[in-house]
Amino acid sequence: MKHQLSIVILCACISNASSQYYLRGVVHDENGRGLYNVHLRLRSKGNYPYYTGNTGGFGIPVSAATDTLFLDFEGFESLKCPVETGKFQSVTLKMLSVTQKLYKHRLISITRDKQDAQHAGIFYNGGESYSTFAENGFVAAKEFPRTGFSVNVDRASYSNVRRFLNIDARVPTDAVRIEEMLNYFSFPNLNSHKKEQAFTCQTQLTSCPWNSNTQLLFINLQAPYISFNDVPPTNLIFLIDVSGSMDQANRLPLLKTAFKQLVDNLRMQDTVAIVVYGGGVSIALQPTSGAEKIIIKEAIEKLEADGETPGEQAINTAYALAERSFNRNANNRVILATDGDFNIGQTSEKQLEEIVGRHRQSGIFLTCIGVGMGNYKDSKLEALAKWGNGNFAYLDNAHEAEKVLITEFSKTMYAVATDCYASVAFNASQVKRYRLIGFDNKTDAIKDTASQLEGGEVGTGHSLMAVFEIETTQKDSLGGTDWRDIIADITLRYAQPGQTPPHSQNFLVANNYVPMGQANANVKFATSVVMFGEFLRKSDYAASYTLNDISILANSALDRHEYSQIEFIDMVERAKKIYAGGKKKKEDE
């Protein structure tokens, strides 16, 4: 009996020594809206992270009557407040100003002497953040004949859109970047050959499905192709986020699987080093030959998620390692893989861009790979990739990881052109006005009169499709094949990696009009992608067609051997069910 009583007393003591209290509360913004996935930390719990739920609520078992609560959330002021753990806590976070500019803003497209000033900022979808964009409108060709756009391989927006639709959720409008949706597909230039040493260009003018008074001009640029065996040595630094927020199946485990598959494609002359950050920063693997696949894979397999996210220190460490192993004749690249939730050190877009910008001219490229949901920071990774002379992808599943890091490894990781952009000069005698579809600029960059067109990185063999909607000076559609009747001329400017003199190529755009029904499959399918993107962005230009119209057009051009095209049609069908109740009201600014 005494023995049993001792056990009861001991259990009571243990219970009293542990969770005597349960701290409950809610975190909201200044408008009273609950904030999802706010990072919480209690002084008594050290660095162990907690997060708010869908409506901003939280509950944490604690052992003391009083404690100190630390709150961090992207785009809001950090907060430290004493709490009585037995009382319900209602905490308000204040949003930060997002109007500060870093050096000169970089534009993804530009029309000389035309700047539209609109509200600037970052759009928050729960704990996720997206840069706000201003849609390109029509421009008078007589007044502003020249425009330009960046050429790159970024395609993160498409897989992120797919992620929302796959969970039966509406897509945040600022998550939709039409040029990246087009980039996701391979639209091979029918005029090019794999051994071309320069860019090739194919153009097509066709009818516009949503406006009988305008036409669509397609510009298909294809980069020179280099076979994998001819690619110079590749020095890779895997910079992997192993913080606590990465401890989910679609984050660190997905990345580990993807990087181990990538290792299988490495050659003896390639090298890999691994820098990890989570609670601290460490070098998990010094530069190692691609021939040592077992060693590299074992280092990847050992990675575990825990701790906070010291992004600043991690980026500096990775670049320092890349500089020590730098090979002038190699492809030197840092691959940053994260959900973008930096919460230790310099964490704003401005601060992180400044860090990466210091290495901009070093010859070290930066590829950003985003994962996760709920606290995914699209705005940060997009900015880092652009400032790091690199590219940007989002992995929503294992298939996408295989596409980015295995199937299209050379296109993603080996650049044949940097600072690449196209300048288009329209013939005002043929074209009355035009608008560039996609390539929309961040609204704060548009307001900055010192903004400059930002060139992009282009991988071997990559094809980019750009689309203009134009209104001609004639009542009828342009037609004929007379090359003397030029709609526009295109100047492509770029630099080759490691070479200082810039290169340029010129292409003429002829009035080769054909109706949409007679256009080739690439043009038809690309049109359906454009229409889908504008529908999801709630564009005014999408008011005259439906998702069913998009589905019919896409099916008319479907290549049943292309999995990505079949999947696109499935995405449109999913969207039909999600948006069946009509277009969602515009989110509160």
Image (cartoon, rainbow, N blue to C red):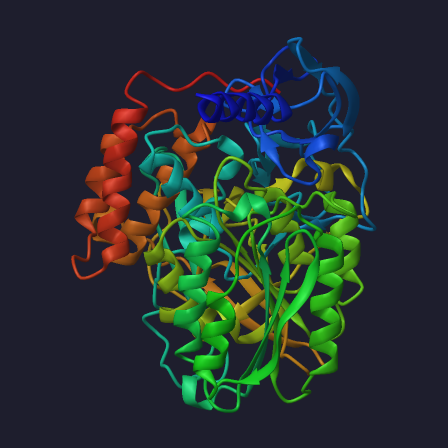
Outermost front residue: 1
Quadrant of the drawing holding the C terminus: top right
Quadrant of the drawing holding the N terminus: top left
Front-most of residues 278 and 149: 278
Residue 145 appears left or right of 559: right
Q: How many marks?
A: 0
415, above or below 52, in the image: below
Front-most of residues 131 and 274: 274
Query: At which x and y percent is residue 358?
Result: 80, 64
Front-most of residues 270 and 382: 270
Query: At which x and y percent is residue 427?
Result: 55, 54
25, above or below 560, in the image: above
For image coordinates 56% across by 71% down, the residue present is 506
For image coordinates 50% across by 38% down, the residue present is 175
Query: At which x and y percent is residue 570?
Result: 23, 42
Q: Is residue 261 visible?
A: yes
288, above or below 415, in the image: below
Residue 138 appears left or right of 355: left
For image coordinates 47% across by 78% down, the residue present is 224
Residue 520 appears left or right of 146: left
Quarter of the image for residue 469 reads: top left
Query: At which x and y percent is residue 265?
Result: 40, 79
Quarter of the image for residue 200 reads: bottom left
Q: Is residue 145 visible?
A: no
Front-most of residues 360 and 166: 166
For image coordinates 74% across by 51% down, the residue present is 352
183, above or below 417, in the image: above
